[in-house]
Image (cartoon, rainbow, N blue to C red):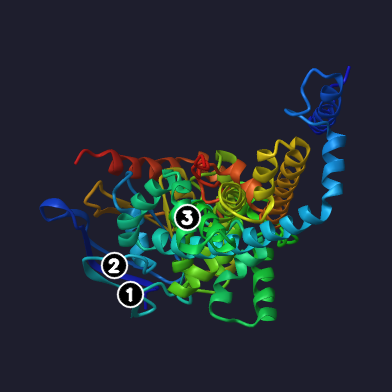
């Protein structure tokens, strides 16, 4: 069974003159444990798609199944979300932020602590639990966000341009870190990005979306070996894959 | 030469001011009627210490009750107006305009309704302090970064959980700013109304001694009001500092986010 199964999903934003079509006839299926990256031009609706996968927004038509059951509302036990901006709560420490989803479900305090500390260790922030978000760098904040997304151990992790606000070097490091965390946890990841290099570097499969109304216009299997290394970026295969995506995106519609 | 720190300069200026207050009237450059010297003021204060103490108690109790009303009603109304869209569209322009009205014109009516005792002062000062509290609470709730709510929802937060765990903590900085402003206005409201029509309180002492041209006693009362306001401000700052470990730094790193407080209108002139 697929971890995520999207069937003929379309979305129309209500507005003047019958509304604006945002997403059109999107079908996709992600196998458990796969790393799928969605790329597309700005405004193609990729964030909307992710919001729908997270149950935060409702599609006009079509179905989304996660673990065989439809997604109609946020379900943190099945889907964890990491947002673009550090959406950590500034009034909570890293540890309290990481615990937050568990606190919402009323998990006992000791258990919460233990899980959150485990997650902070996993993302490489051992000993930073008492820090507030403003005391952390951009990369560290996103590490906490990842820890928070993973703390309920959902099979699926959705990531909406999580590293977009970071500088180039931190972004590379974080991509590498994410792969390390992913290889340890074997989550199914759906990752949205603008960066083609990031897409090829991270993904098992890249889905390319068209400008609005967003459709999936290409599916590219990235057959680079794992673990990925920075050196791979300089190879011909990497360049060709990147070029193929670029050609799809720049294609005039 | 190393420049003295701003704090040193501030204390220096204060000392200078006190020295001038003591020295100028003694040189005869300023008539005693305009400015009695510091020592004379303090002597006058000490001589009538019981009267001043009783007046202070009256003023303090009025300020206390008025602040409770202003903060309680202000936070409640602000939360409703800021949180419920229809209510906001309907009411916020009204409240914003009312804030610009010099509410002191209502005071004569209040004395007719509530008499010249403490009730009319409390009513007037309570309404006077209500507006900044209400407006900043509404602003605080309205300007919460929607990303926080979205993140909470993605983690499965119910509406009551969103309110208790996200909306309230996120709006605390702006609400506190409003409380500080509102509290200061309450003090002003009480003192002004005591000066206008009353039979007790520090403001009453100011206007009573002024009519008999007893400058030393007028200044003694002014000094007490000054101390009262400064004390309140120090207290409010201390509370803000304790509550907002995360806020000051957040303000620098993320301008425009929920950490920074949106501008609350400056207090309207009395």
* CA distance separating discs 3 and 1: 26 Å
Nearer to us in this view, B178 or B61: B61
Q: CA distance from mark 1 to mark 2?
A: 7 Å
Q: Which residue is mark 1?
A: A72
Crowdedness of circle 2 by 10 Å Cα count: few (<14), some, many (20+)?
some
Q: Position of residue A128 (x, y in %)?
A: 72, 58
Position of residue A81 measured from the top left corner of the image (x, y, whole percent): 47, 64
Residue A190 is left or right of residue A218, and the answer is right
Q: Are marks 3 and 1 on the same chain?
A: no
Mark 2, residue position: A58
Element on which disc 1 rests:
loop
Crowd around label 3: few <14 · some 14–19 · many ≥20 (10 Å): many
Sort mark 1 into few (<14), some (14-19) or many (20+) by Cα contacts within 10 Å: some
Q: Residue at x 53, y 79 (%)?
A: A105
| Front: mark 3 or 1 | 3
| Depicted B20 relative to depicted A64: above or below | above
Where does residue B140 sit, x and y in percent of width and height? Answer: 49, 54
């Amino acid at each position: 069974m697929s971890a995520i199964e999207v069937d003929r999903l379309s979305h129309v934003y209500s507005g003047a003159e019958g509304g604006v079509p945002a997403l059109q006839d999107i079908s996709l299926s992600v196998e458990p444990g796969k790393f799928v990256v969605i790329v597309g031009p700005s405004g193609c609706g990729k964030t909307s798609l992710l919001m729908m996968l997270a149950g935060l927004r409702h599609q006009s038509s079509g179905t989304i199944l996660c673990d065989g059951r439809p997604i109609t509302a946020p379900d943190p036990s099945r889907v964890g979300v990491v947002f673009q901006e550090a959406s950590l709560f500034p009034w909570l420490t890293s540890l309290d932020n990481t615990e937050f989803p568990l606190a919402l479900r009323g998990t006992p305090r000791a258990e919460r602590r233990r899980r959150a500390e485990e997650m902070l260790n996993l993302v490489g922030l051992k000993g930073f639990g008492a820090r507030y978000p403003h005391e952390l760098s951009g990369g560290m904040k996103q590490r906490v966000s990842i820890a928070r997304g993973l703390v309920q151990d959902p099979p699926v992790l959705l990531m909406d341009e999580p590293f977009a606000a970071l500088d180039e070097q931190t972004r590379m490091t974080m991509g590498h870190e994410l792969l390390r965390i992913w290889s340890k946890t074997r989550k199914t990841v759906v990752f949205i990005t603008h960066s083609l290099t990031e897409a090829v570097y991270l993904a098992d499969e890249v889905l390319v979306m068209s400008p609005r109304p967003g459709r999936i216009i290409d599916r590219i299997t990235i057959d680079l070996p794992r673990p990925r290394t920075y050196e791979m970026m300089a190879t011909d295969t990497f360049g060709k894959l990147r070029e193929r995506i670029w050609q799809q995106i720049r294609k005039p519609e | 030469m190393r420049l003295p720190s701003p704090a040193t300069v501030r204390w220096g200026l204060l000392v200078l001011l006190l020295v001038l207050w003591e020295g100028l009237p003694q040189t005869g450059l300023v008539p005693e009627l305009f400015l009695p010297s510091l020592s004379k003021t303090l002597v006058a204060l000490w001589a009538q210490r019981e009267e001043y103490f009783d007046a202070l108690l009256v003023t303090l109790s009025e300020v206390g009750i008025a602040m409770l009303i202003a903060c309680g009603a202000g936070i409640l109304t602000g939360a409703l107006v800021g949180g419920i869209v229809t209510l906001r569209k309907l009411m916020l322009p009204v409240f914003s305009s009312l804030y610009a009205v010099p509410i002191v014109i209502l005071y004569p009516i209040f004395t007719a309704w509530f008499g010249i005792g403490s009730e009319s002062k409390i009513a007037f000062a309570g309404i006077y302090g209500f507006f900044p509290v209400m407006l900043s609470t509404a602003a605080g709730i309205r300007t919460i970064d929607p990303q926080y709510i979205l993140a909470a929802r993605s983690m499965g937060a119910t509406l009551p959980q969103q309110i208790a765990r996200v909306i309230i903590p996120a709006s605390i900085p702006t609400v506190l700013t409003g409380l500080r402003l509102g509290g200061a206005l309450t003090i002003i409201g009480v003192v002004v109304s005591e000066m206008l029509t009353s039979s007790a309180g520090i403001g009453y002492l100011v206007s009573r001694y002024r009519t008999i041209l007893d400058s030393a006693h007028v200044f003694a009362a002014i000094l007490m009001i000054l101390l009262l306001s400064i004390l309140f401000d120090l207290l409010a700052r201390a509370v803000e500092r304790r509550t907002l470990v995360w806020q000051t730094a957040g303000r620098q790193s993320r301008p425009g986010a929920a950490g920074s407080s949106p501008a609350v209108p400056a207090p309207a002139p009395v």
